Amino acid sequence: MENINILIADDKREICESIEENLKIEFLKFDGIDPDKIIFQKAFTDHAYKHGCKLIDEGFSPDICIFDLVFNGDTGADLYKYCKINLKNKPIHLCIYTGTEKTFEKRKDAEIMASEYHGQVVIIPKPNISDVLFWFGNVLMKEFKYERKYEEEDPFDLL
């Protein structure tokens, strides 16, 4: 199994950490995933864009990204474009996980980008982490060919 590199960027550290912990739990639902092969990098603070760019410049090559839409003027869409350009258009799956934005123009730009990348980019409104995890599980199944584990016996049948 190759590494699965995940980049999370938000201006709030707590959100980045929460997303990471939720993804770690989601990985447990799949067969054949070695936890040592999952590499997380996080870019947080108001300068998440610059920190994310620095991680790319230092050689981190994400397969999956979860970005906030806006951090201090820059956007998750900007960071995604930076990744695509600097990683020679490598296929990267992106979830823009965003709150209600005051700047509809940035939201519109992200929606246009999502349509341009034909399914590699989705936009999910906060606080719907379950939708993010559903998207993430689909990426693991469709793109990485992992199979979801299913319990043989339902523990609730014993009640």
Image (spheres, grey):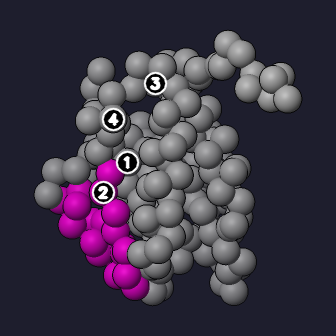
Residue annotated with mark 2: 41
The amino acid sitting under disc 4 is Pro
Crowding at mark 3 (Cα within 10 Å: few <14, some 14-19, many 20+): few
Residue 153 located left or right of residue 26? right
Residue 7: give x, y in percent of width and height.
Answer: 37, 54
Question: Which numbered disc, 3 or 1, marks the residue that appears first in the sequence?
Answer: 1
Circles 2 and 3, Cβ within 8 Å, touching? The answer is no
Spatial separation of the CA atoms under disc 2 and disc 1: 6 Å
Residue annotated with mark 1: 6
Q: Nearer the viewer, residue 86 or 126?
A: 126
Question: Which numbered disc, 4 or 2, marks the residue that appears first in the sequence?
Answer: 4
Magenta-colored span: 40-57
Q: Quadrant of the C terminus?
A: top right
Which is in the foreground here, disc 4 or disc 3? 4
Which type of secondary structure does the marked residue at label 3 adopt? loop
Question: Which numbered disc, 4 or 3, marks the residue that appears first in the sequence?
Answer: 4
Q: Nearer the viewer, residue 55 or 113?
A: 55
Q: Residue at x 65, y 57 (%)?
A: 129
The amino acid sitting under disc 1 is Ile
Specify the farthest residue to the front: 159
Spatial separation of the CA atoms under disc 1 and disc 4: 13 Å
Residue 131: give x, y in percent of width and height.
Answer: 70, 50
Q: Residue at x 45, y 79 (%)?
A: 11
